[in-house]
Image (cartoon, helix red, strand yellow):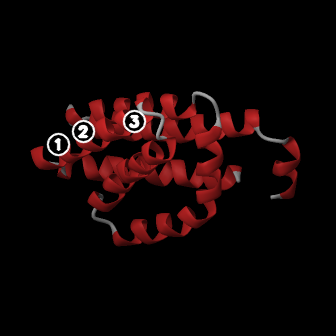
Amino acid sequence: IEETFQIRASLEELAVSLATPRLDEKDLNEIESLLRRADTALTQGEREQSSAFGAQFHQYFIQRADNRRLVTILSGLDDRLKCFRRISDLITGRLEKSRKQHQQVFEAVCQGDAKRAGRAMYSHWQSVLKDIKETSDERLWDKQ
C-alpha cells in the first residue's frame, strides 16, 4: 500500500508539472468549477459526491499532461487505490484537508508554477497516506 502511494504521489507530481504549462483559461475555469462543486457537495454532506469531484480534479491533470504512458500507468494504479480512497473518505476531516490541499495545487497552477504545483500534489498524496496509516488497523499493513 505504501509503495503504491509513493509511486502515485511521484507520478501525479509529474502529471501536474507537465500539465501546468499546457493549461489555458478554459482549463483553469474547469478546474475551479470542480473545486467549487466538491466544496458545495462537502458542505451539503454529500461526501461521496465531493470525493468524486476530487477524483476528477486529479484526472484533469493526468489527462492534460499529454503523456499516454503516464495515463496508462496511473490508470493501473487506480484499481489498487480505489478501496483506499473510500477508506480515506471516511476519516474524519480527510475530505476537508484534501479540499485545502487541492486548492494549494490549484493556486500554484494558476500562477504557472509547475514545480510548486507538483510538490503540492506530492504532499497531498503523502498526507492521505499518513492519515490512512494513522487511522487504520496496523495488521492491514502487515498483510499487503
Quarter of the rendering occupied by the N terminus? bottom right
Instruction: Estimate the spatial distance between the alpha carbons at disc 2 and disc 3, rounded to whole Å.
Output: 10 Å
Judge left or right: residue 121 versus residue 127. Answer: left
Occupied quadrant, residue 65 = bottom left
Badge 2 density bin: few <14, some 14–19, many ≥20, Cα 10 Å? some
Residue 8 vertical position relative to residue 134 in the rendered view, above or below: below
Badge 3 density bin: few <14, some 14–19, many ≥20, Cα 10 Å? some
Occupied quadrant, residue 133 = top right
Instruction: Estimate the spatial distance between the alpha carbons at disc 2 and disc 1, rounded to whole Å.
Output: 5 Å
The residue at which mark 3 appears reads as 102
Residue at 64%, 56% in the rendered image: 83
Residue at 85%, 42% in the rendered image: 138
Q: Amino acid at mark 3?
A: His
Q: Position of residue 80 (x, y in %)?
A: 63, 63
Sequence-wise, which precedes: disc 2 or disc 3? Answer: 2
Q: Position of residue 17 (x, y in %)?
A: 33, 47
The residue at which mark 1 appears reads as 29
Q: Amino acid at mark 1?
A: Asn
Camera-side residue of 49 and 10: 49
SS at mark 3? helix
Judge left or right: residue 27 versus residue 70. Answer: left
Q: Position of residue 69 (x, y in %)?
A: 40, 71
SS at mark 1? helix
State if disc 1 and disc 3 touch (CB < 8 Å): no
Q: Which mark is residue 32?
A: 2
Judge left or right: residue 123 versus residue 2. Answer: left
Camera-side residue of 16 and 45: 45
